Amino acid sequence: MAARQREISVSEFFTKNRHLLGFDSPTKALLTTIKEAVDNSLDACEEAGILPDLEVTIQALAENRYRIEVADNGPGIVKAQVPKIFGKLLYGSKFHRLRQSRGQQGIGISAAGMYGQLTTGKPIVIESRTNRRQAAHRYELVIDTLRNQPVIKRDLEVDWEAPHGTRVAIELEGTYKKGRHGVETYLRQTALANPHVEIRFQGPAEGEVLAFQRASSTLPPEALEIQPHPHGVEVGLLLRMLKESKARRLSSFFQTEFSRVGPTLAQRIVEGAELQPKSSPKRVTAEAAERLIASIRQARIPAPPTNCLSPIGEERLLASLQEQIAADFYAAVSRSPAVYRGNPFQVEIGLAYGGDLTSDDLVSLYRFANRVPLLYQQGGCALFKSVLSTNWKAYGLQQSRGALPSGPLILMAHVASVWVPFTSESKEAVAGYDEIVREMKLALQEVGRQLARHVRRTERRRDADRKRAYIEKYIPHIGIALQDILGLSEKQEAEIVETLTDTLARSRKM
Amino acid sequence: MSSKTPAKPAATSVVKKIRAEARGIRSKILQRKTPAMKFPVRSLSNVVYRPEKGHFQIKGRKKERTLTVGTVKTFAQTLRMMAFSQELIETDDMATKREAYYVSKNWDDARFNEQPESDTVIEDVEALFGVNREQLGFVPEEKGGDVAGELIVVDHDRDTGEKLRIDCTRFGSGAYSIPISVEQLQFETNADYILAIETAGMFQRLVKHSYWRSANCILISLGGVPTRACRRFIRRLADDHQLPVYVFVDGDPYGYSNIYRTLKAGSGNAAHLNEFFCVPQARFLGVTPGDIDEYDLPTHPLKDVDIKRAKDALKNDPFIQHHKPWQEALQKQIRMGVRVEQQALAKHGLNFVIDEYLPRKMANKKAFLP
């Protein structure tokens, strides 16, 4: 069985699962490739404490054939790491750790390289320099699909001006489109959720250049890695952790492998499962593991630490919106961290209203998970549903039943978590955990109230202006009538009109 | 012109009133205060019924129209209407209410969109100064009512001033039309009473059969709710010659509480003028709710508006509230749920009304409603 499984080539695996990985259509394949490369670059820069400068280039080679290039000023990659990062499906350094990062499964960029190789036969080209003293290298990486092995075909020293950075180039078959699911939209939203990032974009057409300026010159707080919280594990994961743990006793296993578990709690969990604290973790049977899970569920365990999260933050959200969107009013809310199934998460909402935004259309909702824009499957996303089920009429917007509100409004909804629960592997829609929906609604209500205050204030001002115009329309007639009746001079008439206009303007209650 | 002479002294006093009001407003404005005008409230809620005088009298309640956003348009329009009125008086001219509405079309933003708006403003100005619209230079274009019977109206030729004696028995199948202004008229008559009739149809029938001759009376067609001129005409005629006035209208709440009540006691709308435009000596001949049974008359079901009007009168009309028989009549009508028209009497023959109904009614005047 295991032997047969190994025989399934990665290309076959990929072809069968491309829809799960985000390569189900030529348009999406191109976008996903850019997305994975950008995510990788940003994660690398931030981990190294570097303010990211990104250059994204799309070159049209032939019809439906493009060369995608993403360059960053990150720390660079040493040769030994290149195959692991770009060549091996399901390798990823991120799968086993609990820390907020863009990619979660670690299949992203390698899948993109695989897709490129399958559709064009061309290798992934990686140029990288790790520091000033080292020369930059150019690697051509091919995946041996029979053995699921990445192979570096060529390794050249090349010139590179910057002291460090990485450039990834992938040739692929795809379609370049603009609009809601376009590259431009993705980059614009990426810049919105990452105000510390600067992105330059060169599209396939001549002169198709965009630049997104950095709105904040400080990196987001570093997200720390945490151990899993007991409430977040299931039997399968628990069994694997038991097997892999270096702990010799069950009680120390719980204390070292999990967050928020001390000696007393560990003992209570183990005894609750009718096991001995001193027995070896490796000997726990599946049946005993289930008892352990049940015991964990019974136990009252403090919430996990939240320093593993790196929210955008209210101030930076505001700065970002102000930099990217010309509106009259901006609001941002960062909720305090909360927990779903043992995973800390945090919800943030940003809002821009009025100004250049059009008022007839439905509100534009930009969804983000760990700062990554979610462009597909809006209808199935808990963030979208939370916006739908909020009563926006109370906040001065129009809203038809079962629809997004309408008005000159852009809404950003961000959920940051060590483990964002997506509805599928393609990571496009957030699953509707009660805790997440509840936090979303509270955040929406909070920005909604701020918006309502602004809308009311604007309306009052507009009302007052209208009133003044109305008053001033009829005051001259009072002047004319009094002039006629009393036989006043023009000067006397003008005095009446002037004085009355002034009096009413002063007495006007705002 | 001679016909306007009685209006002259009043005219100058009206101009004085207009000027005084305008001066007051101007000085408020120059003191940087918001000016206000005080109008008597023109509705039934601001009248009391004075049984000893027989008409509605205005209570003191006034509404103040302060110059604010909500009132600035009407405020300006009222002032412009006052200016226009002053111009009419000073040039010895006049305008119908419709003409006044059209004149306002020169007022740019202050123009009236519909005539009812300008009519209301004219009525406001009347009430403000406690004068009638003729004194302000405005005349209604409505018809005053028709007269036939034992009456000679003495009028003057408008050009020569020569006395004109108009014999209301000599209009054949037609009738004399009550003019808009009746103050200059004099009357000669030997009639026993005045019969005021709501519908033109019934009036025609009585004229055609010269009912006025056999009954020795004066027939007046009201044509719905009587105009001020019509009310004034009947009042002066009845006062001058001590004539009783009997009123014959459709048997429905509109006939009772609108036509008859307005004729007898005046209206809430022009309460400050009711003293002149009412006929306290009027008595109600029919058709009463009781007649429906007594004469076995064909009926129509009361409409919702009829019921509402009847209930409204019972609740809010000071005249109805003062007269128990009227409350009983309206309650009876609501109970019966039907109304009856004057001309339903034709069921018993076209001339049943002349041969039977009116003689039987006249034989028992005590049964007339107050």
Image (spheres, rainbow, N blue to C red):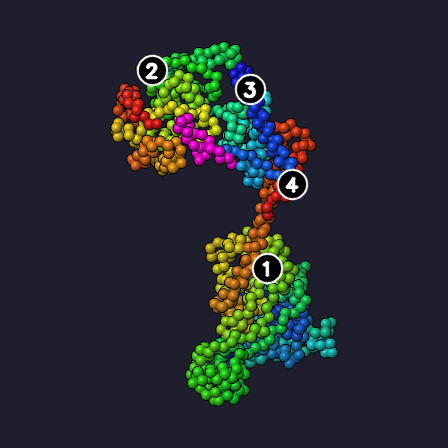
At label 1, the amino acid type is: Ala
Give the alpha-carbon distance from disc 2 to disc 1, as whole Å. 89 Å
**Looking at the image, do the residues carrying marks 2 and 3 touch, with CB atoms under 8 Å apart?**
no
Q: Which residues are magenta?
A: B41-63
Q: Which residue is mark 2?
A: B216
**What residue is shown at x 44% (from left), y 32% (from top)?**
B47
Query: Dot 2, crowdedness within 10 Å: few (<14), some or many (≥20)?
Result: some
Q: Which residue is mark 3?
A: B8
Disc 4 on helix, strand or loop?
helix
Q: Are marks 2 and 4 in contact (CB under 8 Å)?
A: no
Q: Which numbered disc, 3 or 1, marks the residue closer to the eye?
A: 3
Disc 2 to disc 4, C-alpha distance: 69 Å
Of badges 4 and 3, nearer the viewer stands: 3
Quarter occupied by residue A198: bottom right
Q: Amino acid at mark 3?
A: Lys
Q: Is residue B114 above or below residue A147?
A: above
Q: Which residue is mark 1?
A: A331
Q: First in sequence: mark 2 or mark 3? A: 3
Q: At label 4, which amino acid type do we have?
A: Asp
